[in-house]
Amino acid sequence: MNILLIGLGRIGKLVARKLASQDEKKLEWVGAVERIKDPELFSYLLNYDSTYGSFDPKIGHAADSFKVEHQEDVPFFDDVALAINETTPDLVIDCSGSHQSADLLIGISDEKSKHHLFAQALDVVKQASDTKVWVFGVNDNDFNRRLPRNIINPGCLNNCLIPLISCLSEQFKITKGTFVSVHSVTNTQPSLDRAEHSPRWSRASGSNLIPAPHDNMSLINKFFPELEGQLIGRTVRAPVDHTSYVTCSFEVSHRIDRDSVLSCLAKTKIASTILGMDDEPLVSSDYVIDPRSCVIDGTSVRVIDGSTIFLSAWYNNEYAFASRMIDIANRINDRL
């Protein structure tokens, strides 16, 4: 299956590394798009990363392409429409977060690009026809019969919370809940104070804990309509460069104890590659290349007054999220 990758930022870089290092080469990387057409610069950024270290085998470059070991050169573009015309991809993976790119993809004919996988739930994508959210490991069966043209990977925190709530809902009826995520810094934040879209977002990311709302509750509500208006949460951006930690409190409708919660977590139908649990007292640096969407901190699990589940979970908001992009791409390839 031919893959066109748009955006080589934090997520796009990790997706590109995974495309370049496949053992079986089921996904053929046929093009990359960035607004700055500089293969030399981006090959350097793909090969070296301050968080994830160096990449091997190294990705080389020519004037208009990347050179990837054991595959044909990957053309490099600075124009999405041109890239699609030149490559006619089976799947476009859009990690750019660009409204302009999303608008173009939504409107382009399916003769030029068959399917689109978006790394952000932009409004223009959510409102488009033939669009569906895929939380890998939770609603995979929804995609067995027919693949929609536009698929949304709903974000790192949603990829953590939705499997967790799905797991608990296998045995308990959740009536309400709250969560707070201590989230690592991202490139959308300024390193020093500068005017941004809100006062707090304008403050230096490396010097502050920065509270922010969780702005995609609507996607959680799609999966759990019974919790609409009964589940609320927010994030606090923290000055670490990877991995986040969410703490949740869920009220349930009948009496429970800690053992029943641990049993539920252990017996879940959700694959251990998606939802796991660690009982050791680990910290964020221990999860730098952990591909799981949600890793419950086993030391945190408590039951309050026989009716409230309290627990925390780790998720690598970059590495695990990029891993789900590749998982979805591989599953799309299996369906085509």
Image (spheres, grey):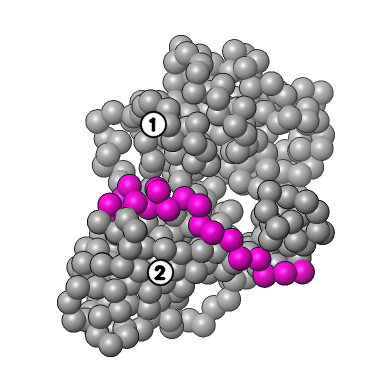
* Residue at x-position 60% and y-position 38%: 97
Query: Residue 34, percent across and down?
Result: 71, 31
Q: Nearer the viewer, residue 258 or 335?
A: 258
Tell me where the magenta segment starts and ends, as one range.
207-225
Question: 133 or 274: nearer the eye?
Answer: 133
Q: Is residue 207 visible?
A: yes
Residue under the image location 38 percent in, 74 percent down: 249
Residue 144 in percent (x, y) is at 27, 35
**Which amino acid lies under the numbered mark 2 shown in the image of this protein?**
Thr
* Left or right of residue 300: residue 245: right
Q: Picture coordinates of residue 74 (x, y %)?
A: 66, 26
Q: Any mark on residue 200, and which?
A: none
In reply to whether residue 273 is colored magenta, the answer given is: no
Q: Quadrant of the C terminus?
A: top left
- Residue 7 lies, with reference to residue 10, above or below; the image says above
Disc with the residue nearer the chain's start (2 vs 1): 1
Mark 2 secondary-structure assignment:
strand
- Which tag is nearer the camera, tag 2 or tag 1? 2
Camera-side residue of 250 and 265: 250
Count the marks: 2
Q: Is residue 195 left or right of residue 86?
A: right
Query: Callout 1: 10 Å neighbours few (<14), some, many (20+)?
Result: some
Q: Secondary structure at mark 1?
A: strand
Q: Amino acid at mark 1?
A: Thr
- Residue beneath the point at 73% across and 30% down: 35
> Toward which corner of the image does residue 128 lie, by quadrant?
top left
C-alpha distance separating marks 2 and 1: 28 Å
Please indicate, yes or no, whether residue 25 appears anywhere in the rendered image.
no
The quarter of the displayed image where residue 279 is located? bottom left
Residue 207 to residue 72: above or below? below
* Mark 2 touches mark 1? (CB < 8 Å): no
Disc 1 target residue: 131
